[in-house]
Image (cartoon, grey):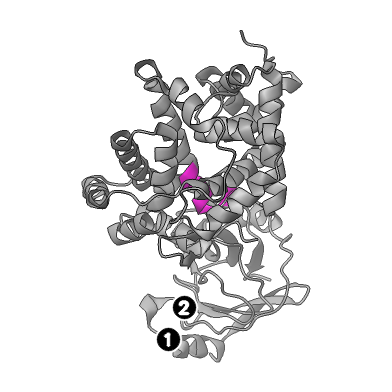
Amino acid sequence: MNLLNRNGNDVHSLVGAYAVDAVDADERRMFEEHLRECESCAHEVAELQQTAAILAADAETAPPAGLRESVLREARAVRPNPPVVTPLRRRRPIGGWLLAAAAALLLVIGGIAWHPWTSGTPTVSAAQRILSASDAERYAHRDGSTVVTVVRSPQLKQAAVTTTGLKAAPSGMAYTMWLIDASGKPVDAGQLPPGASGAVTYVLRGDAASATAAAVTMEPAGTNPAAPSSKSIMAMDFSS
Amino acid sequence: MSVHAVDDSSGRPVAPDRLGGLITACSRGDDRSFAELYDVTAPRVFGLVLRVVRDHAQAEEVTQEVYLAVWRTAASFDPAKGSALSWLMTIAHRRAVDRVRSAQAQTDRDTAYGLRDRDRDYDVTAEDAHRSMDAERVRKALATLTPSQAEAIELAYFGGYTHREVAALLKLPVGTAKTRIRDGLIRLRDAWGVER
């Protein structure tokens, strides 16, 4: 019955049927195996699922009034599953991490000043204090017209990042700051607000005096990851 | 055309970031965000599920399952892999299809489908007083498909049939139905400018 060859080209041709769940259980299993190793199919599936999701607009129907309450009640009784946590590669020397940097093609435009992260209070003065500290050290990362500068004051034990020409993060993502501690471990130093672009000033969380470097990764907005989920897109080595 | 936006029942556009943000908040147990997510998306989720499973009571059950799954697995939503709406509707569709297939033995869905829907032909004038603008655009886009592509997609997506069943229903060789489904989806994707 099964005409599909595990390694044959036929597997690819299931991509449309899979995207609309028009596969039986065996085909689903087989295709999902295939998806793990075929990037082009994975990409196409994502696009076709997105396309199919739009089709559903054609079916919109108001749900029965009582449904909302039972959905909410049921959810309140259940704890959301935790995210799948990738084990942290501790002790990895900072050198390797820094080498992984670069590559971010950040472009232009914009200009919002942002108030630092501290619980919503606009503590521009905290940023100003760091930027104008007598012992302020500056570590800049340049990429075209984008300049990202980490300013650190060992005395204040704080650092701030200021940018010009920062390109907004992709939808749903946010620039996430890290301070690298003496053992080479990246410690979450907070997230730029999603949509931040142009000129942004942001006070990093954590002890900047003992940190050996700062780095930036792209993470889903609104998360507090325990470890970077990917290579850094910028890094500033404090020993340089 | 914006393909990411979803209209809620009032027709207010909802930014895609907003949906993603709501899902992220759900992963941290924020039930107010969950309620808002429900309010914004329930007509679309319930409508799709109802269209696939047909039975009102079962559609309610499945919709409830869908939102509970969303609540539980919100942390697995990855904006890098697709839009929030796509993530949600994929869960809803999968659940609806699973339900309708497991119920297949007890129902005479095939007959009902043949009588009611085979010659509906995407009539824009019918029964759509409450439909959003998106629905209108969807119908226009569907009309750009070849009739055989539209038919295969309708049977697969809204009918919940496998591509082999679609082939049998349309009296096509097996490989042809899956090709039509794929080609039709690609055409819609290009018409809508969908990007991951």
Secondary element at tag 1: loop
In the image, residue A229 lies at what x, y percent?
55, 51
Instruction: Kindly identify the amino acid type of the residue bearing the numbered disc 1.
Output: Thr
Q: Residue A4 carries which label?
A: none
Which residue occupies the foreground of this view, A44 or A135? Answer: A44
Does residue B84 show up? Answer: yes
Q: Residue at x 53, y 90 (%)?
A: A133
Residue B84 colored in magenta in the image:
yes
Residue B195 colored in magenta in the image:
no
**Above or below: residue B8 compared with residue A17:** below
**Pointer 1: residues within 10 angstroms few (<14), some, or many (20+)?**
some
Do dots 2 and 1 share one subunit? yes
State which mark lies toward you, 2 or 1: 1
| Quadrant of the image occupied by residue A125 | bottom left
**Above or below: residue A182 compared with residue A5:** below
Which residue occupies the foreground of this view, A152 or A70? Answer: A70
Q: In this view, does A6 lie to the left or right of A79?
A: right
Q: Residue at x 71, y 51 (%)?
A: B191
Where is mark 1, residue-wise? A123
Q: Which chain carries label 1?
A: A
**Pointer 2: residues within 10 angstroms few (<14), some, or many (20+)?**
some
Does residue A152 show up? Answer: no
Q: Residue at x 61, y 25 (%)?
A: A31
Q: What stretch is highlighted in magenta?
A: B80-89
Name the residue furthest right: A144
Q: Residue A157 carries which label?
A: 2
Q: In this view, does A203 lie to the left or right of A198?
A: left
Give the total number of marks visible in the rendering: 2
Q: In this view, does B146 lie to the left or right of A192?
A: right
| Quadrant of the image occupied by residue B96 | top left
